[in-house]
Amino acid sequence: MAGSTFGKLLTMTTWGESHGAGIGVVVDGCPAGLSISEEDIQILLDRRKPGGRDFATPRQEADRVRILSGIFDGKTTGTPISMMIENTSQRSSDYGELAYTYRPGHADFGYDQKYGFRDHRGGGRSSGRETAGRVAAGAIAKKLLEHFGISVNAYVSAIGPVNCDPEHFDMEEIGRNPLCMPDADAAKKAASYLKELMEQKDSSGSEVTCIVKGVPAGIGEPVFDKLDAVIGQAVFSIGAVKAVEIGDGTKVVQSRGSLNNDSFCMKDGKVVKKTNHAGGILGGISDGSDILVRASFKPTPSIFREQDTVNASGEEVKLSIRGRHDPVIGPRASVVVEAMTAFAIADLLLIQRSGRL
């Protein structure tokens, strides 16, 4: 299968299926001497893992990571870092009837057309469980960025019609509610909205915002590997993401140059911007401001309501999906957006360090 590797100098290659023996990732290109442990990686994996919180699939997976290579005495050796996460709570029987039936909103039909064969147990490589490997790789990227004073943090900024109020923003609140929202009032409203949808056997879309602080000006390549283009590819590669925005995003359509341009000024002897409509990136290169990324996730396609579909024999049939599924994707996917954004920036940061004397 092509397309399982992301990055140029710093790369990740994920492997495994949701209902196989396990999933994992190989990270290559990480410099030697970076302090990292399984515990560092586990902190991020615990934010993504199923079970243990409201509005998440009841599938119980410990998601304990095992580092198989590339780290000795708590430091990276400069060689490929291989990590594995065992699958321990598969229920493949839930997917038996899907072997010959295409689920609406899923990759089933496309897989059959592309390969002439597919792993129907949870979606195989197209399953959201594949992202656990990405999060493990992202933990290494985040550690690397911390070395350069760069922080990456993502949270859920909207669920359905409920949006977080910037006036009530509280970063500490993200870890206090199951929806990972930095606004306690918005989290309560979103919870009520999701409960209504679950009673109707339905699901909701969501938005994840990621803020990157401390990126120096000059990161990113000016043509095909623009920083925003690489971040866009990284985040768009996450299943269920249907839109990625940088800075003002789609709002620029209704703006004007006199409003959208960020004026430069001097502060403490440094060139800075008075505003940040550009989201920290100009001409594909970081400008020293905070990098602002937003990802829009479609509603979870696995819903328990009866739907119209077609089977592999071309017959129109009715389908009611069984199994264990999240009613909203954003809360568990926020750390995946964080991981992929961190990895994209870390890769281009390492490339930049070899780009000039």
Image (cartoon, rainbow, N blue to C red):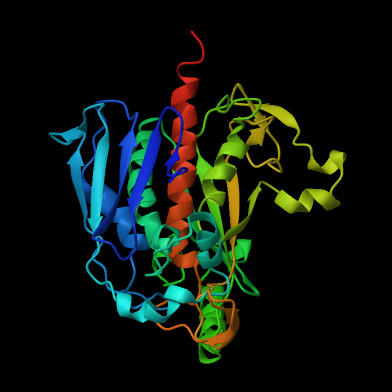
Question: What percent of the width, then of the height, locates residue 198?
Answer: 51, 86
Give me the residue at 28% from left, 62% from top: 20
* Image spot of residue 309 (x, y percent): 59, 80
Residue 341 seen in render:
yes
Horizontally, is 55 left or right of 44 in the view?
A: right
Q: From where the camera sits, is residue 326 visible? A: no
What is the residue that sits farthest to the bottom in this orientation? 199
Callout count: 0
> Picture quarter containing residue 162?
bottom right
Q: Which percent across, then down, holds residue 135?
A: 37, 51
Would residue 196 appear left or right of 13 to someone viewing this image?
right
Task: Determine whether 13 is above or below 240 in the image.
Answer: above
Q: Name the spot of residue 155 as percent of width and height, x first.
A: 50, 59
- Residue 325 versus residue 27 in the image, above or below: below
Residue 72 lies, with reference to residue 56, above or below; the image says: above
- Please identify the residue farthest to the left as the structure is shown: 73
| Nearest to the observer: residue 255 or residue 231 | 231
Residue 313 lies in what quarter of the image?
bottom right
Residue lying at 36% horizontally and 34% vertically, measured from the top left: 144
Q: Residue at x 59, y 34 (%)?
A: 227
Left-right relation of 82 to 289: left
Front residue (pair 292, 231): 231
Please say if 13 is above or below 177.
Answer: above
Give the camera-side residue of 104 and 10: 104
Q: Residue at x 18, y 42 (%)?
A: 68
Identity of the residue furthest to the front in this view? 313
